[in-house]
């Protein structure tokens, strides 16, 4: 469901007037990519890992992370895969001012976005990054063991419009949190963000990340630098 996406507005601001949204079923992804007529494409959940084996070449960061959110097509139909989410989340952390070095961080989710978030956090010097899944060893049933976390990041789509009353976890008992980051950007303040703010915890949604990764992607699509400001 892409109707909630702000990407067309953002890309028009960056000079990409022809940016369009395509909803593709899982069994139609490869045919869509190989169908021709595409010059560039963003990939969102749940396809960031799905398209990886369909890429002919990968950027170093996409190869490291094992997922892509940007595809570029040359005239011969070859597909280049890149990841601009890494830059987007890095800039979001800069925007928040949250200190990461030496701190324990909880990341909710195990998909492509969670992989990217974990990589940025590790590169920023987090003492440990715990990824929470629904069924793995670290899961929502034993969150109690991580009540000492200093930052919590939601890298799942839980709470995204139209399911705005949903939240991936309760913050009750997390007494040491310095901040909460929710990658969901619609609504601007998710239930998780609202709960954090009500508890006096600094919190931010994902709109800044969306815009920052969009700037990085537009630079690839347009082959020119777009000023950060």
Image: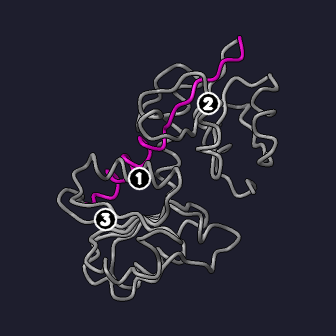
Q: Earlier in the sequence, mark 2 or mark 1?
A: 2
Q: Indicate whether residue 77 is drawn in magenta.
A: yes
Task: Indicate whether 103 appears above or below 62.
Answer: below
Q: Among all residues in the image, which is located at the extreme bottom?
A: 173
Q: Earlier in the sequence, mark 3 or mark 1?
A: 3
Image point 31% across, 68% down: which residue? 151
Q: How far is mark 3 from mark 2, CA to CA?
A: 30 Å
Q: How far is mark 2 from mark 1, CA to CA?
A: 20 Å
Image location of residue 198, percent across then percent down: 41, 84
Q: Secondary structure at mark 1?
A: helix
Q: Indicate whether residue 197 is drawn in magenta.
A: no
Image location of residue 176, percent across then percent down: 25, 79
Q: Earlier in the sequence, mark 3 or mark 2?
A: 2
Image point 47% across, 34% down: which residue? 62
Q: Which residues are magenta?
A: 76-98
Q: Among all residues in the image, which is located at the extreme top?
A: 76
| In this rendering, position of residue 207 left or right of residue 106 | right
Task: Indicate whether 190 appears above or below 110.
Answer: below
Image location of residue 226, percent across then percent down: 47, 29
Q: Nearer the viewer, residue 135 or 77?
A: 135
Image point 64% across, 75% down: which residue? 164
Which residue is under mark 2? Answer: 71
Q: Nearer the viewer, residue 28 or 157?
A: 28
| In this rendering, position of residue 139 left or right of residue 123 | right
Numbered badge on residue 105: 3
Which residue is under mark 1? Answer: 117
Q: How far is mark 3 from mark 1, CA to CA?
A: 10 Å
């Amino acid at each position: 469901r892409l109707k909630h996406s702000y990407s067309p507005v953002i890309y028009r601001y960056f000079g990409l007037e022809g940016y369009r949204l395509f909803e593709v079923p899982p069994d139609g992804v490869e045919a869509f990519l190989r169908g021709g007529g595409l010059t560039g494409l963003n990939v969102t959940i749940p396809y960031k890992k799905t398209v990886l084996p369909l890429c002919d070449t990968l950027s170093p960061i996409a190869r490291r992370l094992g997922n892509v959110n940007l595809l570029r097509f040359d005239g011969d139909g070859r597909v280049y895969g890149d990841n601009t989410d890494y830059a987007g989340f890095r800039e979001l952390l800069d925007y928040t001012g949250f200190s990461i070095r030496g701190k324990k961080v909880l990341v909710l989710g195990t998909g492509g976005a969670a992989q990217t978030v974990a990589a940025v956090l590790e590169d920023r010097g987090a003492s440990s990054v715990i990824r929470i899944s629904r069924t793995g060893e670290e899961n929502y049933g034993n969150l109690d063991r991580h009540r000492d976390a200093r930052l919590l990041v939601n890298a799942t789509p839980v709470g995204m419009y139209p399911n705005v009353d949903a939240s991936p976890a309760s913050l009750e008992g997390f007494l040491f949190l310095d901040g909460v980051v929710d990658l969901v950007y619609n609504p601007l303040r998710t239930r998780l963000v609202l709960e954090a703010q009500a508890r006096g915890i600094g919190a931010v949604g994902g709109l800044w990340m969306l815009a920052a990764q969009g700037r990085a992607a537009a630079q690839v699509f347009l082959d020119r630098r777009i000023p950060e400001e």
